[in-house]
Amino acid sequence: MANRDYSVRQLMELEACTNCQACADICPAVCAAGDGELSALFRMKGLKEIVKGRSSLLRKIFKKKGPSEETWKHFSDTAFRCTLCGSCQEVCPVGIHLKELWLSLRQDLVHSSVYPKKINMIKENLEESYNVFGEDNEERAEWVEDMREEPEDGYIRDKAEVVYFTGCTAAYFPIAQKIPIALAEVMDAGGVDFTLLGEEEWCCGFPMLGAGLMDLFQEFRNHNIRAVKEKRAKKIVFACPSCYQMWREYYRPEGIEIHHASQFLIDLVKQGRVPLKELDITVTYHDPCDLGRGAHVYDEPREVIRAIPGITFVELPHNREECRCCGGGGNLEMVDAKLSAEIAKAKIDEILSTGAQAVITSCQQCVRTMITYVRRNKISLEVLDITQLIQRALKR
């Protein structure tokens, strides 16, 4: 085994850790489980040992053996019980790129054949069905059939100015399917010339990133870029922050503008293309990890909320860069559903402390995670995506 999954910068950053414990104090997994071995601090120490133990020169000098199979398994279990929320990176006083390091670590663990077996399921689903859930990819756009006014073409058009990239979660989960329905309805109201990719939309690659399976990514990237360009689109819109992050950081297609739905919506509102009625409701806003800390999109969702007449907006105690994770990221639900639910509990408790009637977010996975927890525990709280809020406020 070699250290090929890490950049030179990352190997240098390992030595920069000061053991200050700021990352442990902020980690949602540590706070929910009360287990310090889930912290970035523990992970850094273990990773240092692994990296140094692989050096043939150091092995000869110190007569060191590599980590035992039991050590590998324990370390892998802690590495994958992480939401990849990026909070540790946000508070690191020496600026270590911790989230990138965790992604490289997961790829290393996959290459080293030490990883949770559910990763195999993710890999098989992606290879066979082109989506993370193993569903029939021909059914990606079937949510259109549940719209109040289903268009004859099902939004599958030969060409359009805008491509709406739905994402796996919104395409297949009934809870999340209300999000693409809402966004399509708003874009119709705003006179947007848009199309879906339908079965030609493949997974964006984010589940591969979190599962350490980036060896699969290039085929998916090439296919999706080709599918968008065949529509001769100038813009691509995502309601999913993870899809948005992948296209923004790993695709970077030439000649195509990339927009998150919140950015696209505020432009429509400012142009007067979606007239809004008054809503008498008190809401708070949850910053999705990949949209907030990941892409630094904080203002646009708040501008959308404040543009609706009559609405009362209250901030969460922890917001923007300090917003706490909902528990739905990093493939954690597949690896440790109980821990994911405990993190969701802490999030919902914080939301309830504001007295808001509804929590708004800009992420289909956040919506799915929070709604699931609210329903299971019979909590009186509405969970809405920003697209659903605008849909509700539309003057018809």
Image (tube, rainbow, N blue to C red):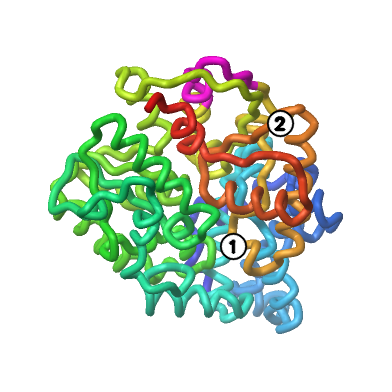
Q: CA distance from mark 2 to mark 1?
A: 23 Å
Decide which of 333, 353 is in the foreground and name it. 353
Which class describes the residues within 10 Å of circle 2: few (<14), some (14-19), or many (20+)?
A: some
User: Would you identify the image quadrant in which residue 352 lies?
Assistant: top right
**Residue in the picture at 57% in, 46% down:** 97
Residue 318: image tag: 2
What is the magenta range? 302-313
Q: Which quadrant would the C terminus be assigned to in this image?
A: top left
Sort mark 1 into few (<14), some (14-19) or many (20+) by Cα contacts within 10 Å: many
**x, y (%) of residue 41?**
74, 53
Tell me the residue at 53%/79% (across/down). 120
Q: Amino acid at mark 1?
A: Asn
Q: Is residue 264 left or right of residue 157?
A: right
* Label drawn at residue 331: 1
Which quadrant of the structure image shows residue 349? Answer: top right
Query: 194 left or right of 78?
Result: left
Residue 264 picture location, percent across and down: 35, 32
**x%, y% of residue 274?**
35, 24
Q: Secondary structure at mark 2?
A: loop
